[in-house]
Image: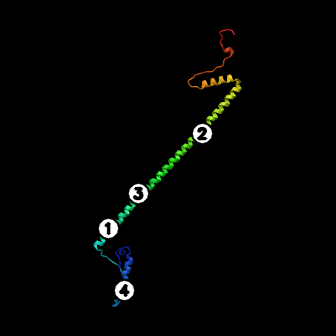
Amino acid sequence: EVSFTELFQDRKQVEALFREAVEDRWNSPPKLHCTMDQFHLGRVRIPEAVGAKQLDAQIQNEKNQEEKSIQQAELERQNTQVKVNRIDLDTTKELRTARAEASLVHASANAEAEFLRAQAEINGTESLLRRAGIVSQEHRMAFAYVRALREREEVDIDVSYLAADTVVRTTPA
């Protein structure tokens, strides 16, 4: 006995089975005086109800496959979105970390530069005072006061040095 599904899915085996059955019948008494050279299964009439059921089953299988493909595509889209979000978060984290480190390096460099500038100013002022011969505390304070006035933007000041021959005297000395 051959099922409907076997007839379509394994046709060669079904043809071999039918050929064997026909040969057995020919070889059984009363024996026919012929030999079977070729055997081919031609048309098979399929009842309309069976054909409709098979067609409906095939259509349902196709619909199931379509739904499975749609669900798989949606799952892939969601997985891709998760990966994209993870990459975006990692990128944002790395960017913020890099900016924070750059800011720290910048602030450290500015602090070190300010420290070096202040040290150079102290050393330069000390060297200037020593070379100019300004040793008393009163003269040092006066120098610091004049320098502070010169550094202010809203004050316009010029410092000149007076000598005995550049001063006009109104009373005899």
Quadrant hosting residue 116:
top right
Answer above or below: position of 107 versus 78: above
Q: CA distance from mark 2 to mark 4?
A: 101 Å
Q: Mark 4: which secondary structure?
A: helix
Q: Return the residue found at the far left.
A: 48
In the image, which disc is placed on residue 108?
2
Residue ID for mark 4: 24
Looking at numbered disc 3 in the image, what kind of residue is underneath it? Answer: Glu
For the point 60% across and 39% down, the residue is 108
Q: Is residue 156 above or below residue 168?
A: below
Residue 152: percent from the left, percent from the top? 58, 25
Give SS at disc 3: helix
Q: Residue furthest front?
A: 137
Q: Mark 3 and mark 1: span between their CA atoms?
A: 27 Å
Position of residue 50 relative to residue 23, above or below, is above
Question: Which residue matches tag 3?
Answer: 74
